[in-house]
Amino acid sequence: MKKMLLTVAAALSLATTATAFAASPMTVYATDGDGQEYEGLYTESSWMAIEVPLNALGGSVPSDLSIAVSGLPAGTYVTLDSVSTQGSSALLYVSVTRDSTASNVNALAQINVNAAGSTLTTVQIPVYGAAYGE
């Protein structure tokens, strides 16, 4: 009986770990679309793209693709401008803005990539911004 309980407990632990791992957001890179990669997005930019593997979107870019962003300080925004493909990746061109430049931004954005009313994938990427006078 004891051996069976340990076996069941181990199986449940592995199943829980596998589920948690599968649900974890993937870390992606930013790009300028011309091959240069960046570790994160910069505030006050509208030229950067988030590089997401096409297979994470089901193999192609849906026409109704949208994003929902969390994890950023209040007043910091990442908005989707356009989408293109490059090889086996989708490039999600974004604008990164903030209401005030009085404080630094150093946060990890969690971005749900959505289409047809459901989340296709969740990615995470750092967002950086320096403070400077207003």
Image: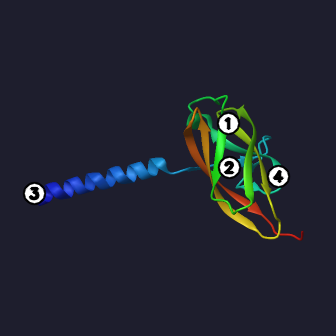
* Real-space Cα separation, disc 3 to disc 4, in angstroms: 62 Å
SS type, badge 4: strand
N-term-proximal mark, 4 vs 2: 2
Position of residue 120 in the picture relative to residue 50 (left or right): left
**Residue 74 percent across, percent down from the top left:** 70, 62
User: Which residue appears at 12% of the width and 60% of the height?
Assistant: 2
Q: Are marks 2 and 1 in contact (CB under 8 Å)?
A: no
**Residue 42 percent across, percent down from the top left:** 78, 56
Q: Which residue is mark 3?
A: 1
Q: Which mark is residue 90?
A: 1
* Real-space Cα separation, disc 3 to disc 1, in angstroms: 52 Å
- Front residue (pair 119, 57): 119
Q: Are marks 3 and 4 in contact (CB under 8 Å)?
A: no
SS type, badge 2: strand
Q: Looking at numbered disc 4 in the image, what kind of residue is underneath it?
A: Ser
Task: Give the label, 1 or 4, closer to the camera.
Answer: 4
Q: Looking at numbered disc 1 in the image, what kind of residue is underneath it?
A: Ala
N-term-proximal mark, 3 vs 4: 3
Q: Quadrant of residue 101?
A: bottom right
Q: Are marks 3 and 1 in contact (CB under 8 Å)?
A: no
SS type, badge 3: loop
Q: Which residue is mark 4?
A: 45
Disc 2 crowd rating (10 Å Cα; few below 14, some 14-19, many 20+) is: some
N-term-proximal mark, 3 vs 1: 3
N-term-proximal mark, 3 vs 2: 3
Q: In the figure, 23 relative to 104: above or below?
A: above
Q: Residue furthest right?
A: 134
Q: Looking at numbered disc 2 in the image, what kind of residue is underneath it?
A: Tyr
Disc 1 crowd rating (10 Å Cα; few below 14, some 14-19, many 20+) is: many
Quadrant where the C terminus is found in the figure: bottom right
